Image (spheres, grey):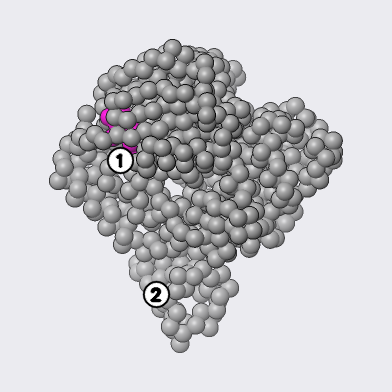
Amino acid sequence: MNGYGGKILRVNLTTGKITKEQTPADVARDFIGGRGFGAYFLYKEVPQGADPLGPDNKLIISSGPMSGLMIPGAGKCDFTTKSPLTGGYASASMGGHFTAEIKYAGLDSIILEGISPKPVYLFINDDKIELRDAKEFWGMGTISVEKQFKDKLGEEYQVAVIGPGGENVVPYACINHDFGRQAGRGGVGAVMGVKKVKAIVIHGTKSIPVSDTTAYRQAGKALYKACKDASFLAEWTRYGTTVVTSWCDEVGALPTRNFSAGSFEDGKNLYGSVMRDKIVITDKGCFGCPSPCGKYSRSKKYSSYVEGPEYETIGLMGSNLGISDIEAVAQANLLADDAGLDTISAGNAIGWAMECYENGIFTKTDTDGVDLRFGNVEATFELIGKISRKEGLGALLSEGVKKASQKIGKGSEKFAIHVKGMEQSAYATHNATAMLLAYMTCDVGAHHNRAWAITYDLQVGRDLVVPEKVARVIWLQNFRPMFDVLGGCRLQWVELGIDRDLYIPALEAITGIHRTWVDYEKVGERIWNLTRMFWARENNGFGRSWDLPAPRFYEEAPKSGATKGQITKIEDVHRLLDMYYEQRGWNKDGMPTPERLSALNLAELVA
Amino acid sequence: MTAIIRATSALKVYLDGKDEFEVESGHTVRETLVRLNIKPELIALVVLDGEQKTKDYIIQDGDVIKVLAVIGGG
C-alpha cells in the first residue's frame, strides 16, 4: 500500500511471541493511520471492562502516511490505550524521529499485548525483532537509558523509554524519546510500565512506497517553500510555544495558583523573551521540520540541560504553582522528564496539593513536614520524585486530582481541575466559552490540542454562548487531530499559517488516493464518534455529567488579573452542551445516535 | 514621521487587504493597533529587529514592527 510501512507488528509479552500481519486495506481506507489506527484497534481488540493495567489492555503505537517522508513536520507517532488515569480513551502524540523508523522498518503499528514476566525492551532492526532483557536498565531515568542505547547501538536507532514513573505505574506516567519529546498524557507510560517494557529501540532501512514520486517531490517542495516564505518563520522558531506565555497572561488564560486566576503578578519572569535570554542555547526540531520549535536550555543555577520548557510546563509548573523563576521551571521539567511523568498532570496535582495546604485541608503531617505553600520550588522538585516513586504525599498525588480529591473530600473536589479525570492543560477558562467547551468535550479529557479555540473567544466575545462558537470547536475537533492520524505535526499550519490545501496533492501523490479536506474531516468525525462510544462502553452512566468542567470555572471568579470578577454561568455550560450535542448529531445526553453511527459506517463496529 | 506595521495574513482584513501598513511614530503599539481597528488582545507577539517588545513600546521613526496574531495556538 502506497504511503504505508505495510505490516502490523504484534508483540505478545505474556508468551514472548512476535508476529506480523498485513496492514488491513479497509482500515487504512476508513481510519487512515496514526491515531485512527489506534482508535480502531482499541475499540475492536481491547475487551469491554478490561483493566487498563491488566493483560487485556493494549498499547497501540502507530505512524501515519506522512511519517518519515519529506513533508514538513513528518515526525509524529501516536500512542493509544485504555487510560489508567481516566478509564477511558487515551491518545498521546509524540514528536521526534521515532515514527520515521517505524515506517522504515516496514511497519505501520506496533501493538503491545499481555504482560511480560520480567523487564524487557523491544529491539527492532528491520526484520530482526526481539524481546531482550532490560534488567540492567530497570530503575533508571529516561535520559541515561536513551543515552546508553544510542552509545551501544548507534545514533540511527530511535528510542522510546519509560522512567521510574512508568515502572511504578503512576497513572499519568509518560513515554520519553529524543531526550525531550514525550507521549505525555493519559498514562501511556503506565501501561508500558505495567507490561514491563522499559523501552523500544528501532531502526529500519526499507523504502516507503509512494504512488507518484515526481508529484510527491513537487508537492513536498511546495510545502517547504510555504514554510520558508512564512512571514513569522523566524519568530516562531525563536520562541516556539513560549510565544503565547505573555499573551495568555495578558488575557487571563495563564493558569495561576491552581487555576484560581488567569494572570500571574510575577508572570513577566516566565515570558518567552526572558526565557530566551536567560536559558535557551539552541533550537531543536523533529523529523523533517523546517521550523524547529523545541528550545534546548541550560540552567546555570541548577547546572543542567533540558529540552524545554514548553508553554504547558511553564503554565503548570510555573504560574500554576506560584513559581516565577524560569530556571526552576526548567529544572522541574527535567526532573519530570527523567522520571517519566506528564508535566501537565503532575503540575496540576502539585497545585491542588498546595491549595489544600494553604486552605488548611492538609497540615504538615499530610505533607511529610513540608511547608507546601504556592511558590515552594524545593517542595515541587521533591514531590516530582515522590510522585514517581509513590512515596509519602506522592502516593496520593500519583492517583491524579480526581481520585485524590475524592479520597480527601473536605471540599477539595471543588478545586480539582480536570474533566473526565484528566487534569486540565494550561489555559484558564473562567471566561472563554469556546475554549471551555473544547476542554469539556475533548476526547481524552481536559486537553487543548484538539480544539484550540481561545482566540476565537477573543475575536467574537469571550462570554458569548452562540452556535458559531460551537461549530468552530467541532470543526477544529474534526480537523486538527487529522495531523495525528496522518503521522505529522499540525504546527506548520497552526503557527506558520501555511495553506492547508498544500497538503492535499502531497498526500494524494503519496497514497494514490484522492481525498479533500472534507474527506479527511469525515474520517476525523468517524474517529471522534468511535472514541465517544468507547468511553460509553467502558464507563457506566457515561454521558453529559462526564462533560462538565471543573466547578471552579462556573463558581469562583478570579479575584485578580485580566479576568477578575469574570465567570461562566452553569446555565451557559449546559447551553453549550445542548448546542454541541445537537450539532454533533448526538442525543440530549451526549450519545451518538444510531443514525449518526450509520452515516459514519460505524454501526457494525460498535454493535 | 512614520514607521511600518507588518502583520500575519490573518490581520489583512484590518489593513485594506495588505499585510504591511504605514503608521505614525510616537504612539504605543497598543494605541496604534486600536487606531487600526485591531483588538490588541488578538496580538500575541510584537517584534522589532528580532526582539520581543511589549504593546507599550513607543514606535520610533523607521521602525518595522511585526505583529503576530494568535490564530492557532498550541
Locate residue A190 relative to residue A294 in the image: left or right: right
* Chain for numbered disc 1: A
Q: Which residue is mark 2?
A: B21
Q: Between A423 and A450, which is closer to the camera in this rendering?
A: A423
Label 1 vs label 2, nearer the camera: 1
- Which residue: 75% across, 34% down? A393
Q: Between A227 and A479, which is closer to the camera in this rendering?
A: A227
Residue A548, given in percent of the width and then of the height, sits at: 62, 33
Q: Which residue is mark 1?
A: A68
Residue A346, given in percent of the width and then of the height, sits at: 63, 39
**Quadrant housing residue B55:** bottom right
Asked if residue A56 shows in the view, the reply is yes
First to last magenta residue range: A100-107
Q: Are marks 1 and 2 on the same chain?
A: no
Q: Residues within 10 Å of mark 2 (few under 14, many from 20)?
A: some
Locate residue A214 relative to residue A311 in the image: left or right: left
Q: Between A156 and A569, which is closer to the camera in this rendering?
A: A156
Q: Is residue A402 above or below residue A16?
A: below
